Image: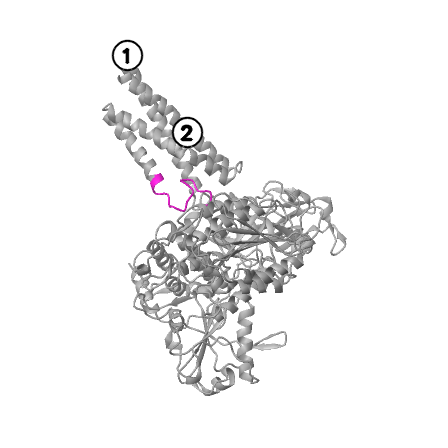
Amino acid sequence: PLLALRVVNLLQERNLLPLGPVTPPTPCLPQDLQKINCHPEVFRSTLTSIPQTQSLLNKAKLPLGLLLHPFKDLSQLPVVTSSTIVRCRSCRTYINPFVTFLDQRRWKCNLCYRVNDVPEEFMYNPVSRSYGEPHKRPEVQNATLEFIAPSEYMLRPPQPAVYLIVLDVSHNAVETGYLDVVCQSLLENINALPGDSRTKIGFITFDSTIHFYNLQEGLSQPQMLIVSDIEDIFLPTPDSLLVNLNECKELVQDLLRSLPQMFGKTMETQCALGPALQAAFKLLSATGGRVSVFQTQLPSLGVGALKSREDPNQRASAKDIQHLSPATDFYKKLALDCSGQQVAVDLFLLSSQYCDLASLGCISRYSAGSVYYYPSYHQQHNPAGVECFQKDLKRYLTRKIGFEAVMRIRCSKGLSIHTFHGNFFVRSTDLLSLPNVNPDAGFAVQMSIEENLVDMQSVSFQAALLYTSSKGERRIRVHTMCLPVVNSLSDIFAGADVQAITCLLASMAVDRSVTASLSDARDAMTNASIDSLTSFRTSVLTIQQPGLLAPACLRLFPLYILALLKQKAFRTGTSTRLDDRVFAMCQLKYQPLAYVMLMIHPALYRVDDLTDEGALNVSERTIPQPRVQQLSVEKLSRDGAFLMDAGSVIYLWIGRNCNPNFLTQVLGLPNYAAVPLNMNMLPELDTAESQRTRVFVGWLREQRPFFPILHVIRDESPLKASFLQNMIEDRTESALSYYEFLLHIQQQVSK
Amino acid sequence: MEAAVFILSLVDCCALIFLAVYFVITLSDLECDYINARACCSKLNRWVVPELVGQALATVLMLVSLHWFVFLLNLPVATWNMYRVWKVPMGNMGVFDPTEIHNRGQLKSHMKESMIKLGFHLLCFFIYLYSMILALIND
């Protein structure tokens, strides 16, 4: 805490970034409680010391909220199979490491403070084979664990894995060549789809009519059934449109091999997405499952048809951006219908023109699906995009999945949740309906303090996710976090988690842009930094010094706010396509914290002088750890090479006078002039420098579930502008530099 | 003639009171988890326009019968109702949107709005009752 409150004068200290990644603050709990507390990658709070009263929170001018990544792929997850799952009788909280045992037979809930009895079965600990020590059981020793749920937790028998692929086969779509990639990827990964012997699969293709495929076992080849009455969609046959994958595998493979050729010569230009989605819903409503929709243009026919709303002249508008909210409620209504029948819709948008993602995205947002966006996808013109699509598809098809899930987030008495962020539907107060849950989705909630938290040393939060695994097992994943309660403003500032605050503010700003206006959202973000620093200055600082003073834990806050203002989602004055902007907003709300931070503030490294000094040793590989640099062209040096990791894309910038050693040993090129304009791969050369660079890039890539494309940038590269746009500390014609922004804040703070 | 106007307004006001009570009960059902967001919002959205019509009717009646004070009392509520319906964004499913009702304290603000309207309609009810009795006596 003392270190966190060290006063930093932002106008004077220029090197604010830590050497490595920014670490979250540790809550000030007793050592034994903090050791078993939930991991910050799974559950994180914006303030690690919770204020005692709402008025204290209001004085701090920082948002209070939680950021969760509940279904994250974990390497170690204790699984408990128990006949009795011990829960509090009144609030139904699962027993967790932060309850208090009054004696061996009674336990006190840490959320509602009710005293419960310990059931007889719980007294026996199967792990240590001892009796009478309930506090040694795994449920009380682990903050993150998974229960196998008995039948009381099932509304219906666990559903099988059901996958429906819906493909756009209009002329536009076939021309991009995406069908080849999707069919190829499905063929390769067909045995790796999560599921068991009951797994079902089906296909629908659409252009101006809807095509179903009869894949009944016994047919010599797949039979296509066309429904042209798109005003009133019906299913042509009652069954065998969704078939058991194992029984009909050859037919499915036949279909996947023949699909690209089937539509190779199509001249259909219309696209009836709405009716196709209605057909998909009809097909899956009996069982639930996952729909993967691939779309390449604006839907033009039938219900849900959209008009082009974007005005290309307004892309670089310095004022408000219009059309950020949906144009029609059709997709939202359909998403809610799907959510009610446990169907999730994932949308893949591969288009070079405006597709009204603001309206289309609703189908995924409220049915707990995900949106993937590949602007200007084309198999010949954009080979890097093709590779990205392939790798993303592989991850999408093979990652873990949970069906018919619900999640409940409980807080200690006195705290309540008032806003939710993420892709799901809030069915009732704090019950989130998630037809599909996947390991790459992040969620956030905002809280308020309804009653003063007096006499409490700590408060707890529990997120319980009840889902059906792909093998048909009903499971409950429980995460519990405990945080201390404080009643002084300086303690609140000491426990502020700047990255969590930034991400929560980003989600709030997206909401504000859609409900009010973009300029409102931008002002609100700037005011967030001004207000919190003013509050620090007036209430916590004892000695008034000149300059812009911030506590060490919030020293990066103005930098992150500036980064958000320059982010594609919120920037004005720079030409931004509307779909790109809306997708950036979707990602800010959907991605877990680590990737959102990379999106907002990319990491810049110098890579032409990588050494093994301070390297990480992971599974026999030595991974160099270069220092993180500030995002300013000041830091770029003409005789070096720099790597910028922006989450979904990696830029490798080569300086004009770059070290020839680097060019030959790592890029395999004789000189700077030989660097091609679009190079996307590091050649595998047998040199130590090449090895180090490739290991470093590989390490960056494997830490995330999506595949970042590598772009090598030189002076005349077309992507140079995108690379320079990430230099947030620099001045541009429409935005302030970091120093100017600090001066602006200081002016407002000193008023 | 006076009495007839007030009898009509009284009946209209009764209907508005019942409607306000229905709104309050449905919203509190949602708060206590007896119904889900979708059911609640579709129930309430059905009655938004009838409420608007009822309130507008009372306002117009007062205007036509030249009772300025009561007209001015009713006018803000009528305009607020119309504004509420007009400013619903295109992507929302009506004034009560099930995807937004649990965000940003919308449930609480809708509840407060309905309670205020209930109080207002009760006040109007007694005004109309008194005026009607006065008119009947004077006839």
Q: Which residues are magenta?
A: B84-99
Q: Which of the marked residues, 2 or 1, is nearer the chain's N terminus?
A: 2
Same chain letter for marks 2 and 1: yes
Please name whichever residue, A103 or A492, is drawn nearer the observer in this view of the structure. A492
Quadrant of image for the C terminus of chain A: bottom left
- Element at label 2: helix
Quarter of the image for residue B95 reads top left
Q: Nearer the viewer, mark 2 or mark 1?
A: 2
Q: Is residue B93 magenta?
A: yes
Q: Is residue A17 above or below residue A429?
A: below
Q: Which residue is mark 2?
A: B19
**Can residue A66 be seen by looking at this rendering?**
yes
Labels 2 and 1 touching (C-beta < 8 A)? no
Compared across the picture, whether A722 is left or right of A30 comes to: left
Residue at 54% x, 64% y is A180
Q: Which residue is mark 1?
A: B137
Please name whichever residue, A671 or B102, is drawn nearer the observer in this view of the structure. A671
Mark 2 surroundings: few (<14), some (14-19) or many (≥20) residues within 10 A:
many
Q: Is residue A555 magenta?
A: no
Q: Is residue A196 above or below residue B111?
A: below
Please name whichever residue, A60 or A598, is drawn nearer the observer in this view of the structure. A598
